[in-house]
Image: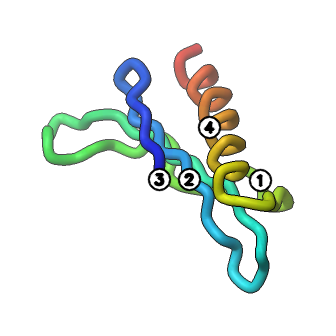
Amino acid sequence: MPIKVIDSYEVEFTGEALEGTAQWGAYVSISVPSANPMHMTALHPKRRVSADLALMDQQAAEAEAERVAMTILEGLRG
């Protein structure tokens, strides 16, 4: 599960196997530090980026998740 820190946002983008298929789903979560240094505050809890999008492998799913995460971050910043 790749994680990037962009500005103060911790962005996790993952590709997970879809149960009962040979396909993969793209998932994103975005967090920021909280007042407690041991915890993060979820701004965008982990969720599948598109319910009808199934990809052929984990790398493709992670790439799609990263693309969507950047779009979500643009909205949070603006």
Q: Residues within 10 Å of mark 1 (few under 14, many from 20)?
A: few
Foreground mark, 1 or 2, reads: 2
Whole-angstrom CA distance, mark 4 to mark 2, is: 8 Å
Q: Amino acid at mark 4?
A: Glu
Residue found 55% across the figure and 24% down from its top: 76
Report which residue position mark 2 lands on: 14
Q: Is residue 67 above or below residue 2?
A: above
Of callouts 1 and 3, the N-terminal one: 3
Pointer 4 residue: 66
Considering depth in this image, is 23 or 51 the residue closer to the camera? 23
Q: Which residue is mark 3?
A: 1
For residue 19, what is the image quadrant? bottom right
Alpha carbon separation for disc pair 4 and 3: 11 Å
Picture residue at 40% right of the left edge, 45% below the top: 42
Disc number for residue 50 = 1
| Mark 1 residue type | Ser
Where 38 falls versus 66 (above or below)? below
Label 3 and label 2: CA atoms lie apart by: 5 Å
| Label whose residue precedes the other's in the sequence (4 or 2) | 2
The three-letter amino acid code for the residue at tag 2 is Thr
Circles 4 and 1 in contact, beta carbons < 8 Å = no
